[in-house]
Image: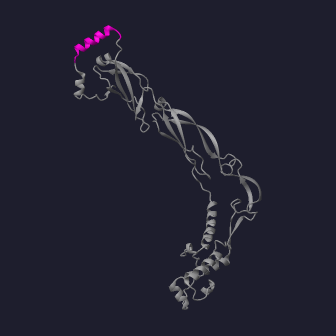
Amino acid sequence: MDLYVVLGLPHGATESEIKRAYRRLARRFHPDINPGDRAAEERFRQIAEAYETLTDPDRRSNYDSGRSSTSNPNRRPSGFEGFDFSSAGDHSTTFGDLFAEVLVDRTAQRPKHERGADLHHTLQLSFDEALSGATRSVTVTRRESCHSCAGVGRSRVSAGQCHVCEGTGSIRSVRGHMVFSRSCAACGGTGQLRSQACESCGGSGLETRSETIQVRMPAGIADGARVRVPGKGNAGTSGGPPGDLYITTQVALHPHFRREGDDVHIVLPIAVHEAALGARVDVPTPDGPTRLRVPPGTQSGQRFRLRERGATSTRDGRRGDLIVEVRLMLPRILDERSKELLREFGEINGENVRERADAGQSRPEPGSND
């Protein structure tokens, strides 16, 4: 076998001439372009061997001197390995595009099992619902598997000739001097149409539906928290798993309570005599009213802690505390008798409270009122 004759070149051809000849013949006889053609496969093997030998200086020198390297007729052709088609001139784009069509066509026929998209919903809760927990109805509009085609995207019809490939099962495309043949995507290469795109979903396998679901909000859920509902997002494609539904809470403010972490705070007004002499007063809690002991001499702004009367932690189930901050409320002085009593009280207790404040007396820490 004369390797120069295989490439259609005279002896003494330059390396650039060898490359140009190889490019031209490889496009014509490559097995991917001539599927099932044994003669083309053998011809391509000879072309590849000639190219590998004549582009290697040592092997070409041995061949030209009559010491050709032994060829293996059973060796699989190396294809385009070691050759850069990026420098193939104007024809390289055509060649690359043709192979891209083959690869894309093969890839496109493989169904992609993709997970469905997650959905997000905002749910309004009252302060009491957030503390005690609640079950709420949530209406979600999402993409689900089509009932008509069971998510396949196609419906069965009577067998008939494919109108896309006209019954051949393949699509032929011409680019320059080369002809490509690829499997018809409409009929799967059979040439017969036994199914068509589902009319209900347009072939997507999915349709939009609304569903009302019951969602349990755990006790102690905070403002801005997210609750995950598995499998209630959009359906996946080609049998892929569905996404999830994420519900973000918006907790309304309470007229009396304020939440910090798992602790609940409240400001409680008390009268002058209750702060001075001490008293037992009613204080509202998330669980209902309870009695708080106010010790004698309580200052305005002093805080008391009622343990395990706050919010339930969604992490470990423990309850926070209720922090009660007392505020001294002065009475309305409407009669002379009350004024006289206050004047007398001031004369008996002539302490300068401003000097005591300047001395740096700090506000007492929250005291336990278990």
Outermost residue to the bottom: 65
Q: Depth check: 81 or 88 in front?
A: 88
Q: Quick one: quadrant of the C terminus?
A: top left
Position of 209 with respect to 56 (left or right) is right
Our reading of the magenta stretch's main secondary structure is: helix
Q: Depth check: 159 or 252 in front?
A: 252
* Residue 162 shows in this picture: no
* Residue 146 shows in this picture: yes
Q: How many marks?
A: 0
Residue 245 lies, in percent from the top left, at 54, 43
User: Vertical placement of 145 versus 52: above or below?
Assistant: above
Residue 262 lies, in percent from the top left, at 40, 34
Asked if the magenta segment contains residue 336, the reply would be yes
Report the coloring of the rendering.
one colour
- The part of the chain drawn in magenta is 334-350
User: Vertical placement of 236 versus 297: above or below?
Assistant: below
Q: Quick one: quadrant of the N terminus?
A: bottom right
The residue lying at 57 percent from left, 88 percent from top is 12
Q: What is the quadrant of residue 222 in the picture?
A: top left
Residue 152 lies, in percent from the top left, at 66, 52
Residue 185 lies, in percent from the top left, at 68, 60
Asked if the magenta segment contains residue 58, the reply would be no
Position of 217 with respect to 366 (left or right) is right
Q: What is the quadrant of residue 361 in the picture?
A: top left
Outermost residue to the top: 337
User: Vertical placement of 336 versus 185: above or below?
Assistant: above
